[in-house]
Image (cartoon, grey):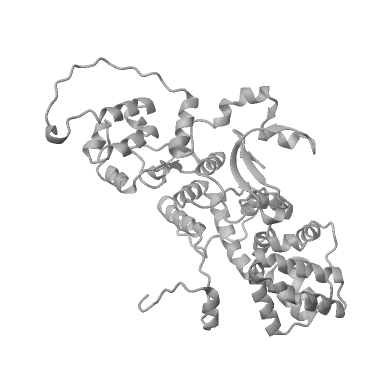
Amino acid sequence: MENRSNIEWNKDDIEELGFVKVDVLALGMLTCIRKAFQLAKLHYGLDLTLANIPQDDPEVYRMISAADTIGVFQIESRAQMSMLPRLAPKTFYDLVVEVAIVRPGPIQGNMVHPYLRRRMGREPVTYPSPDLEEILGRTLGVPLFQEQAMKIAIVAAGFTAEEADLLRRSMASFKVNGTLFKFEKKLVEGMVSRGYDRTFAQSIFEQLKGFGSYGFPESHAASFALLVYISAWIKCHYPDMFACALLNAQPMGFYAPAQLVADAQRHGVEVLPVDVNISIWDNTLEPHKGRYRALRLGFRQIKGMQQEEMEILVAKRGAGYSRVSELRDKGISQAMIEKLAGADAFRSIGLDRRRALWEAAALTDRPTGMFTGQSVETQQEGQLFLPLMSDAQHVVQDYATTSLSLKAHPLSFLRPRLEMLGAVTSGTLNGLAQDAQLKLAGLVLVRQRPPTAKNVTFITLEDEQEAAT
């Protein structure tokens, strides 16, 4: 933009000068959605936008209510997944609530369980007063949003508009200077003097403290809920392009590429390996006889690859490579060739990983310097047969090079030994009695230690069947 200036001043200095402050969030999911829309146009002939995605799709809400949300914006954490079946969203506003409810504000203010009980019909929906019914009607009498807390302060505690604005500012800086406590007495006593229950008044203040660390305004939650629905719709109806776009937008979210690929496979998407004669830098979709396109992994999935060199490889590929040495002749460095071989990317020319690594290493044995281009007499070797790598060795190398494997899950090779130790699989957990003691093994996907968990660490494990927390 012409004549625009960028400054890096502190937000408080900006406010002192009277400038308008606007938060611009760089969300990776926006990149993912844009890439998904491009894939929809290219492969399905769909001209999708944020505005024309079909609304209120029951199939999407069924998927969300089943907590089938790996990769979906904002509701993919295990905390959100545990909440989804209980809240069972059926409308867009339910998603707005879902985004806001798993936050320190509502949790610390003890608002979550009352809301769920009321939503599930286990507790009557009541309001502290007729004045507050208009404020709390959409959330079943339970305050969940920052705006609601501010309106309650005005309507129920007698705050002026200026005082409510100071309250808002103190909520935003609670962790910094603790000025929110200056309003505790005025808020609680003001509500009590107007006939409100002291317990309810104190719970409102506790919620405000939670907002000081991380609370959602309703408008913010609604904006995020839109991206929740859009990403869920894409995953529900086009898991192939959702997985492809998500991988091309990495790094983002809770899950590594291995989990995103496994989830796509569970939804019926065939995933194809990186290949020097087929792949490009990004992950792509290919025609497939099934319901969805096949997902072809791109060179970007290989650790340490240089995009510039891979674009040269693709540009000079022509009808395809038939020998490893051709890549060197096209200007691809030895380091990149070895990484491609290590990633088992030469299958289309009949070379498995070990043979490709052997061929790649042989490229270094050639005249260099002043002898470049000169022939060297060598004795013809007979056919060399290298021992084949086991599936377990392939999987280990797959994870080392691409952080995922299409061949098998690492724990599948350890299962016989784990069964001898009495370890169960994640698929058997639903059949176990409550409070049963068990042994469970898996890859650690996520470690979370939220401030509201009272020093409890939540760990998500994955075995060859699925993930469990």
Question: In percent of the image, x 68 and y 62: which residue is there?
Answer: 97
Does 257 sit left or right of 131 as displayed? Answer: left
Q: Which quadrant of the figure has residue 316? A: top left
Q: Which quadrant of the figure has residue 356? A: top left
Question: In percent of the image, x 78 and y 59: which residue is there?
Answer: 119
Residue 114: x %, y % from top left: 80, 60
Residue 277: x %, y % from top left: 32, 37
Q: Which quadrant of the figure has residue 5? A: bottom left
Question: In percent of the image, x 43 and y 23: which residue is there?
Answer: 389
Is residue 367 visible in this depiction of the protein? yes
Numbered marks: total:
0
On screen, residue 333 above or below 235: above
Does 435 sit left or right of 211 as displayed? Answer: right
Residue 262: x %, y % from top left: 54, 39
On screen, residue 272 above or below 208: above
Does 239 sit left or right of 430 as displayed? Answer: left
Which residue ends up furthest to the front in the rendered image? 177
On screen, residue 423 above or below 167: above
On screen, residue 44 above or below 103: above
Looking at the rendered image, the quarter that the N terminus falls into is: bottom left
Which residue ends up furthest to the top in the rendered image? 382
Is residue 215 visible in this depiction of the protein? no
Between 195 and 364, the one nearer to me in the picture: 364
Residue 370: x %, y % from top left: 12, 35
Looking at the rendered image, the quarter that the C terminus falls into is: top right
